[in-house]
Image (cartoon, helix red, strand yellow):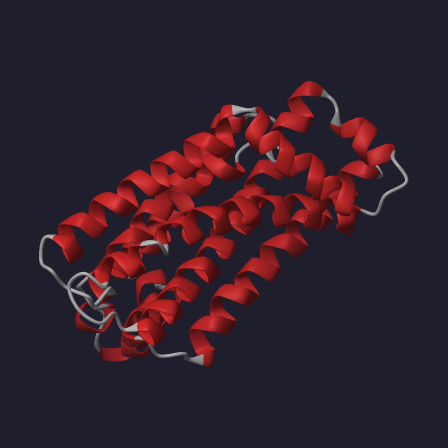
């Protein structure tokens, strides 16, 4: 796994992908920080975290689109799959490499914390928990993007499909209407079930506790379990391809 991890991490910085992701994320995060915190001279980063998650929706598909799609298109996946290395090591090596680039971007924006000391006393515990939530959400997005990349040899299709799914999850949970207000009577239970489902899958709802500085086990489990699910699905896809 170590060799795969090092190979993938180097690939991010031998190609424009890693630089595009980092520059786009840091630019838009800095813009949000300037508008929300610096302009308002505010040391509470709840507003920043509530908005910067949306940046991940658009930039993480760029980070993950090449993980397996590029291998399939260039046919180098056959060399990888026939090498004496476990599928689990291949998948985790690629996942950890993408997660490392993600972590670099997040750590870079943590430099905002000492800047806020110019305007007051930053809420360190709340800020750290907010960044933790952002990172866990990013891991889920990376795992999802990796899975979509394993399904196609087109990087564009991998990126667009990842973006579409993440965007749907982000927007769907933020809808203001309630199914229980539309579906009533005999099928009222269905409306309540759909309301619960919409609330459960909402990424914004899961980030809310982190943004408040509250470390709750439910959102942690939500992001970690979904990341684990898509890593598992990716392993299954690659295993099926190896034995074809």
Q: Is residue 154 above or below residue 130?
A: above
> Which residue of the protein is positioned furthest toward the front in this rendering?
118
Residue 15 image point, x, y percent = 55, 24
**Picture residue at 28% right of the left edge, 74% below the top:** 212
Residue at the image position 32 percent from the left and 45 percent from the top: 55
Q: Position of residue 125 (x, y in %)?
A: 35, 75
Q: Is residue 2 left or right of residue 136?
A: right
Vertical order, 115 against 162 (above or below) = below
Image quadrant of residue 173?
bottom left
The residue sitting at the left extreme is 40
State whether residue 197 appears in this view: no
Residue at the image position 53 percent from the left and 39 percent from the top: 64
Residue drawn 56% across the image and 66% down it: 225
Say which of 184 and 31 sits in front.
31
Q: Pick the residue in front: 244 or 99.
A: 99
Asked if 244 appears above or below 230 in the picture, the reply is above
Residue 211 shown left or right of residue 166 in the figure: left
The x, y position of residue 97, in whole percent, is 62, 44
77 horizontally vs 65: left or right: right
Residue 171 seen: yes
């Amino acid at each position: 796994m170590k060799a795969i991890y090092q190979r993938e991490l180097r690939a991010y910085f031998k190609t424009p992908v890693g630089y595009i992701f980092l520059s786009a994320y840091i630019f838009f995060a800095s813009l949000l920080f300037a508008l929300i915190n610096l302009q308002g001279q505010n040391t509470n980063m709840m507003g920043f975290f509530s908005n910067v998650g949306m940046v991940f929706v658009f930039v993480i598909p760029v980070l993950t689109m090449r993980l397996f799609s590029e291998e399939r298109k260039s046919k180098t996946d056959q060399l990888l799959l026939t090498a004496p290395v476990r599928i689990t090591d291949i998948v985790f090596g690629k996942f950890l490499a993408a997660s490392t680039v993600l972590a670099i971007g997040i750590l870079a924006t943590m430099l905002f914390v000492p800047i806020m000391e110019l305007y007051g006393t930053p809420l360190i515990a709340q800020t750290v928990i907010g960044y933790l939530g952002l990172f866990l959400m990013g891991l889920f997005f990376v795992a999802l993007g990796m899975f979509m990349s394993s399904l196609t040899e087109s990087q564009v299709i991998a990126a667009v499909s990842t973006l579409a799914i993440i965007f749907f999850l982000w927007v769907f949970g933020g809808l203001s209407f309630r199914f229980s207000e539309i579906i009533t009577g005999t099928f009222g239970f269905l409306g309540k079930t759909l309301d619960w489902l919409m609330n459960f899958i909402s990424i914004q709802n899961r980030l809310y506790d982190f943004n408040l500085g509250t470390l709750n086990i439910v959102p942690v489990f939500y992001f970690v379990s979904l990341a684990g699910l898509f890593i598992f699905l990716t392993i299954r896809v690659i295993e099926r391809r190896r034995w074809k």
